[in-house]
Amino acid sequence: MRPQFLDRFGLCVEVLGSSDAAERRLVLERWLAFEANPEGFSAEFASSEAKVRESIEQARQLLPQVELSDGLLERALQVTAEADVQGHRADIALVKTCRALSALAGDRMAREGLLTQAARLVLPHRMRQNPFDTLEQQQLRLNSLFTNLAGAGRG
């Protein structure tokens, strides 16, 4: 996809299948259970889904109160500059994601560690890619950026 279209996606996650036999078995068993009895399967997980729904609702209510310090805002801008992203959508998405993660954690003040988590969701699909880079080289570049970000957050 062209970069100008990718930039319009706020967040990006990589979804991989597990290579662990036990995890694969669990996925298969749950799929079979759902196929056999969708209502019963849904009822089995209703309580845990309700807890997730409640935590999301609490975060939505807290979100307008979440603040970013000037230092964290500057750090966010530094991170997007280091990632060599174009435009301002990455800056906006990074700050909004950091605030949302803070609200989900129940915090009224955003923290550096959550900025790192947000960057992992906001930056990978926006970073300029060398067309000759392998997937492994791109991943190394991302890991280096996140290692630097995490290290700076401890200082």
Image (spheres, rainbow, N blue to C red):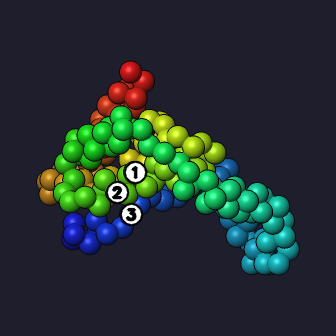
Considering every residue shown, the one lying at the far top of the view is 155
Closest to the observer: 23 or 44? 44
The residue drawn where x is 61% and y is 53% is: 62
Q: Are marks 2 and 1 in contact (CB under 8 Å)?
A: yes
| Amino acid type of the residue that numbered disc 1 sits on in the rendered structure | Val
The residue drawn where x is 65% and y is 52% is: 23
- For marks 1 and 3, give the one nearer the viewer: 1
Closest to the observer: 23 or 21? 23
Considering the numbered disc 2 on the image, is that residue within a helix, a strand or a loop?
A: helix
| Amino acid type of the residue that numbered disc 3 sits on in the rendered structure | Gly
| Residue bearing the label numbered 1 | 95
Q: Are marks 3 and 2 in contact (CB under 8 Å)?
A: no
Alpha carbon separation for disc pair 2 and 1: 5 Å
Considering the numbered disc 3 on the image, is that residue within a helix, a strand or a loop?
A: loop
| Amino acid type of the residue that numbered disc 2 sits on in the rendered structure | Ile
| Residue bearing the label numbered 2 | 92
Alpha carbon separation for disc pair 1 and 3: 11 Å
Q: Quadrant of the N terminus?
A: bottom left
Image quadrant where residue 46 sits: bottom right
| Residue bearing the label numbered 3 | 10
Alpha carbon separation for disc pair 3 and 2: 9 Å
Q: Could one spot residue 96 in this view of the protein?
A: yes
Label 1 or label 3, whichever comes before in sequence order: 3
Q: Position of residue 57 (x, y in %)?
A: 67, 61
- For marks 3 and 2, give the one nearer the viewer: 2
Horizontally, residue 89 falls left or right of residue 53, namely left
Q: Quadrant of the C terminus?
A: top left
Image quadrant where residue 116 sits: top left
Q: Could one spot residue 146 in this view of the protein?
A: no
Q: Position of residue 24 (x, y in %)?
A: 63, 57
